[in-house]
Every structure is written in structure tokens, then in C-alpha cells.
Image: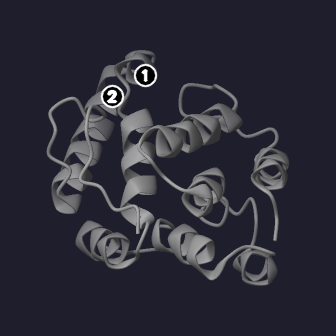
Amino acid sequence: MLTLSEVESLARAAHQGQTDKAGRPYAEHLQAVAEGVRARGGDAEQIAAAWLHDAVEDDALSQAWLDEAALSDRTKAVVLAVTKRARETPEAYAGRILATPGALLVKEADLAHNADPARLAVLDAPTRARLTEKYTRMRALLGLTDQAGHAGHAGQAG
């Protein structure tokens, strides 16, 4: 099995050269989500999934790679659960996350970092408004109801 350090290195390499909407290195987002999962009591499988949570969706790594990777079935399931699919409704996406043990915590950490006011502040007003609405809606669909977007969580370590 891959260690967390190896997963981190793979994720950083896979996303090398990619930036987020604010122009920051994408690996900063991956690290923030992994740290968010750890801070929320996530286990090693969830932290590994946090490092890889956008890899398939962003075509940084293929699903075939994930299928063959030396990762637990649970880590693979969480990565696939949080991977958005083409033309998928937010309701279907949220349903898959809620149905996959361990995925909610990873998505919660992802949403918390995405909705961080400091990250959003550097975006233009229309983009900031669109993303804020999108993240708020997803939090509601997932039952994550704390006002701050990152102060608490609904749990789901299992």
C-alpha cells in the first residue's frame, strides 16, 4: 500500500503546473483539504483520498490508474464518490457522497477550503457570487449546516 507521503508526492506531481481559480498552485488546495480532513478527525484512508480528490476529475490521473493503485478499496471509493461526472445533477452527486462511507468528511474539507473568504476575495465579483452560491447549495444538499462553512461538521469517519 502507498504511504500518505507517497500519495502526497503522487498528487503533487499529477497536478504539477495546474493552478486554482485564483492562480495559486493547485497543490496548495490539495494540502489544505488533506489538512482539513486530518483536523476533522479523518483517518489515513480519508487523508489519502483528500490528496487525490480532484485527480480523476481534473484528468491529472486516470480512473484506470486509480483502479490499479496500491490504495485501499475505501480510499478509491471515496475518490470516485467526490469525482464529479459530466452532466451529473448536484443532487445525484451529493447522494453518491452521502452513500459512500468516509466521503462526506473529504467533501466537507474541500468545500470549506473552496469557500474560504480569503480565497474567494481575490476573484471577480460575479465568479465569487456564483461559487458562493454553488458551495452553499452543495453544503445544504449534504446536510452541512454550520454557518461558517468550516467551523463544524456532520461527521462521518466511517
Q: Toward the viewer: 4 or 84?
A: 4
Q: Quadrant of the C terminus?
A: bottom left
Q: What amino acid is at disc 1?
A: Leu
**Are there few (<14), some (14-19), or many (20+) residues within 10 Å of tag 1?**
some
The label shown at residue 123 is 1
**Which quadrant, please, contains the N terminus?**
bottom right
User: Label 2's element?
Assistant: helix
Is there a contact, CB below 8 Å, between mark 2 and mark 1? Answer: yes
Q: Position of residue 144 (x, y in %)?
A: 20, 50
Front one among 108 and 3: 3
Q: Earlier in the sequence, mark 2 or mark 1?
A: 1
Q: Is residue 95 left or right of residue 109?
A: left
Does residue 54 appear anywhere in the picture? no
Tell me which residue sits at (74%, 59%) in the image.
60
Identify the residue position indicated by label 2 in the image.
Answer: 128
Question: Hey, what amino acid is under mark 2?
Answer: Arg
Left or right? Give the position of 71 relative to 109: right
Q: Residue at x 82, y 42 (%)?
A: 16
The one nearer the camera, 124 or 90, is 90
- 95 in relation to 35, above or below: below
The percent position of residue 32, horizontal first and vertical second, equals: 56, 34
Q: Is residue 69 visible?
A: yes
